[in-house]
Amino acid sequence: MQAAPDQSTRSQRTPAAPAMRRRLYLVAIAAVAAVPILLFAAALGYNQASRERSNLEERVWRTTRDAAMEIDQTLGRHVAALEAISAFVAPDGSDLEELQQGAAARLRNQYGWKRLRLVDARTMKVVASVGEPAGEMHARVAEQIAQVVRSGRPLATVLPRELGDAVPRVVIRAPVLHDGRIDMVLTAEIDSRVLGDVLRRVAPGAQWTVAAIDPAFRIGGRNRAEEEFVGTAITSSLRERVERSVESFFFSLNKEGERVYTLFIRSQGTGWTVAIGAPAAVVEQPLFWSNLTMLGAGGGTVLIAGLLAFFLVGNFERRQHAEEELHALAAQAATEWRISEIARNFPGVIYRRVLHPDGRVSYPFASSGVESLLGISVDELRGPLSMTDLSRVLQGDHLARWRDALDRSARELTPFKVEAPIHTRGGVRWLRSMAVPHRQEDGSIAWDGVVLDITEERRADEQRRLLMAELDHRVRNILAVVSAIASASLPDAGTAETFRGRLRALAHAHGLLAETGWEGASLEKLLEAELAPYRLGADDRRITLEGEPVSLKPAAAQSLALAIHELATNAAKHGALSVACGEVRLAWGLDLAAADPELCIRWMESGGPPVHAPGRRGFGHRLVEESIRHALGGHAALEFPEGGLRCTIKMPAGHAVPAI
């Protein structure tokens, strides 16, 4: 026994461990250097974004307050003018037209009033109307007049779109007092575009949405799309906020479905609310630029830290490289020593084969058994070998098969297995080579495998085949003798022919089994052999076979051959095959998914003479049923419908296997 090479535990370490540690050092150094700068950049970016966000919010609040003040002043001027007129209205409203022609004419030119109406607070009837004709009073309008009477205060609202004109109007309602009580309500209608002009003046930009909302939560003025939305109800999300608080700032969708940050203020004097929707892109833009700045600063920091770590670790890697090479050489020497110790007593050859990118084949390692098996020295085998070198031991078709198997294993990285004879000084020997491939870094394919001497195994297999051939020959001779004796001994020629037919069925099954060394017989070939005598020619379509490839075990093949022979004989004498237009269809299949897997074969006749159930079970009937039941543990069921005989044969799936 050779002594193992002297090596320390350190020399047995794989190169992957130091490489992994160096990568971890590199990541750690880069992280330590980058984290403080990243944190500073993040804090700086967040502070800048917060400051810009705060400035934007302050600007929106200021704009909203200014807009609310403008709306309050505009509505206040109209309310004051209407109250001034209501103070001079007679109890019966008879002087309304005179007042309108005088003072109100100037007010209409100044304030843009479209219509002035006096409504009886008790009957809700229009007492007098000046300006555009007044239509029928809607119930919702009557409710607002009643609200003015109850509160004793003026009320400004927008007419719902379904009640107003093409251009919605804002209605100012003021109570008319006589002797301390409210008998009438004076209303003035103005164009909602008056409020829209105010909102457009204070809007920060064309994409911003500014809206004036009346106490009934309807839009009374808008800087954008006022023809479409003035007079309609506000969104449900905005209404929930307005009902809960006087002012607020939140995210929502506007009437156009755009993402906006909404801010609103409700006036305590008029009850109107001014809401401003800032486009989300405008509000989020500072955060976007701060994030972009932070990412840029962080990326630059990481790059600088990575370069620093690269230069710091580079020198260390160069020092470690030489040590790793020594470790690898020591580990390889130790591995080869261990393999050589194992291969010393191995009854064959252990080898490593390499297929180089240029097509050359070499054996970096081979155990000493290669000299006795192949007649090639270990040193000679380690050098690159060409096809000419290999042809010394592998010749003809075997060399081509070896090369094809090698190429397929290299291409698909599948296990390599080849059996071939070689020519040695001691004669021809059969070897079996088995190896597992893997791809190396340089693109070459390496196989680690073994070579076994199977010469004696091949000789034993050849002897077995010779014995099987001799046994098959003798069995056929015995069957021929038995057939001749039956012909000479049985007085009835029909009985003798029936007996010989059954012997021929067994002979067919025996022949198919002998072809495979009694490992099994193809079900389809067995059926073809038994039914061949009843075909009228190669194109005869009276007999059809349908089923998947199945191989029968010997016992099943012999029993089934007898059963099919009996069915075919009966069909030829009395059934579908006794007439030219009759047909026989055979179908089979394996059901492996069932609780009790089984092989099912169905015999179906059609087109023959009418069928009637026999009065008694004949020998052939009993042979079909009992051969399947007793020999195979299955069952055969015969049915006799008038259209043709039916036979279903079922046996455990263990008697058959799917053929490859």
Image (cartoon, helix red, strand yellow):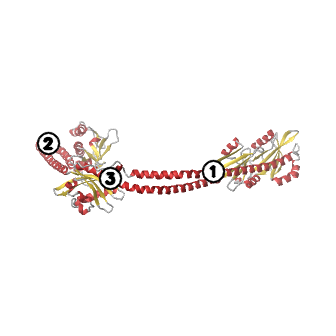
The answer to whether marks 3 and 1 mark residues whose Cβ atoms lie closer than 8 Å is no
- The residue at the point 63 percent across, 54 percent down is 285
Q: Nearer the viewer, mark 2 or mark 1?
A: 1
Q: Position of residue 12 (x, y in %)?
A: 34, 49
Amino acid type of the residue tagged 3 in the rendering: Ala
* Residue count near mark 3 (Cα–Cα under 10 Å), binned few <14, some 14–19, many ≥20: some
- The Cα atoms of the two marked residues, 3 and 1, are separated by 59 Å
Give the left or right position of residue 176, taking residue 558 as reference. right
Give the left or right position of residue 190, taking residue 436 as reference. right
Amino acid type of the residue tagged 2 in the rendering: Asp
The answer to whether marks 3 and 2 mark residues whose Cβ atoms lie closer than 8 Å is no
Residue at numbered disc 2: 492
Earlier along the polypeptide chain: callout 2 or callout 1?
Answer: 1
Please tell me whether mark 2 sits on a helix, a strand or a loop: loop
Give the left or right position of residue 310, taking residue 657 as reference. right
State whether residue 450 appears in this view.
yes
- The Cα atoms of the two marked residues, 3 and 2, are separated by 90 Å
The label number, if any, that marks residue 47 in the structure image = 1
Q: Quarter of the image holding residue 589?
A: top left
Q: Depth check: give the residue in front, 113 or 437.
A: 437
Residue at numbered disc 3: 330
State whether residue 257 appears in this view.
no
Q: Nearer the viewer, mark 3 or mark 2?
A: 3
* Residue count near mark 2 (Cα–Cα under 10 Å), binned few <14, some 14–19, many ≥20: few
| As drawn, 413 above or below 137 | below
Q: Quarter of the image holding residue 439?
A: bottom left
